[in-house]
Amino acid sequence: MMKMQWAEDLAKIVDPANVKIDERLNKYTMTKLGGPADIFVMPESEEQASAIVKYARAHNIPILLLGNGSNMVVRDGGVRGIVLNFAKLDKVAVNGTEVYAQSGALIKEVSKIAAANTLSGLEFSCGIPGSIGGAMAMNAGAYDGEINDVIKSCKVLTKAGDILELSKEELKLGYRKSIIADEGYYALSSVFTLVEGDQAAIDEKIADLTFKRESRQPLEYPSAGSVFKRPPGHFAGKLIQDSGLQGQGVGGAEVSTKHAGFIINKTGTATATDYIDTIHMVQRVVKENFDIALETEVKIVGEDIPATVK
């Protein structure tokens, strides 16, 4: 009953077509895993996003931001409360050497737009599957580049629903961390400062990085991308590989034989429980073999299915 009331109220803030009850989240995650959200809502403006957060706060409703679902595992029982999705906030604009991008835009698409305008600096992100919002929250990086190298400022939404403009320094970006994640903010839009480059050199770098990614990563299977953070002085994939875990897993989930840092939904029928149990199995074995505790880079959210209804 509460869900119906929430949906009715939220439909006064956004287009009713953008409010869904019991929407299955496996449609929005790169792993193709995840149970239903009580309420799934997609704002079309920053003002709508702010109003949704303020509504949730006023009614003590838990709220979760789900971006492109590339760095998240949603448990099989789904998510209680409101799941906020910024896919419709996807505007990108170029002004000189600056690129403005709303948080629902995919970072690899923003990289392509920058390249098409002969701007260099975002090439490293040409293969990252996530959204700008997710990339900002975790200071995403690849191939010796990261968000911290190019960000100028970011507009965020606080847990109270207030909109703030944060400078690069105020974002406190570190290895896979930021004030956005630490404070539970929601990134709304970002401005990147790039440099004018040589078109041939930009295109060559993107082609090279694309080849490396496609040849080394199991892109043919659903996955959450790189599962573990890099331990100091080590590489997670190498530790997993040296533990003989490639091809091992639980249920339909498996440590990729192509890249040991990835856990794939190989059969397409894995459950989130399979995926999470495989993560725990990898952590346990690597700890036993090397006395190194692997930390997850992916975020695990939601609830398990109650035992009585499994």
Image (cartoon, rainbow, N blue to C red):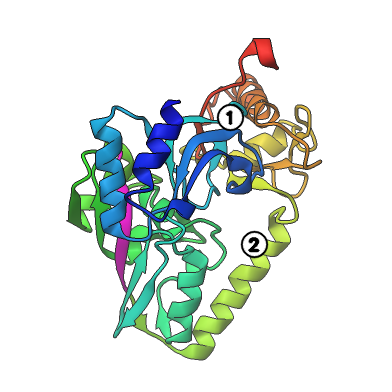
Magenta: main secondary structure:
strand
Image location (x, y in percent) of residue 113 = 46, 78
Amino acid of disc 2:
Arg
Earlier-in-chain disc, 1 versus 2: 1
From this viewpoint, which residue is outermost toward the top? 308
Can residue 123 be seen? no
The residue sitting at 56% across, 30% down in the picture is 78
Give yes or no for contact between labels 1 and 2 (Cβ–Cβ under 8 Å): no
The residue sitting at 58% across, 48% down in the picture is 28
Q: Secondary structure at mark 1?
A: loop
Image location (x, y in percent) of residue 308 = 66, 10
Please provide the residue range marked out in magenta.
Answer: 184-193
Can residue 33 be seen? yes
The residue identified by callout 1 is 75
The residue identified by callout 2 is 213
Q: How many marks?
A: 2
Residue 162 position (above or below residue 99): above
Q: CA distance from mark 1 to mark 2?
A: 28 Å
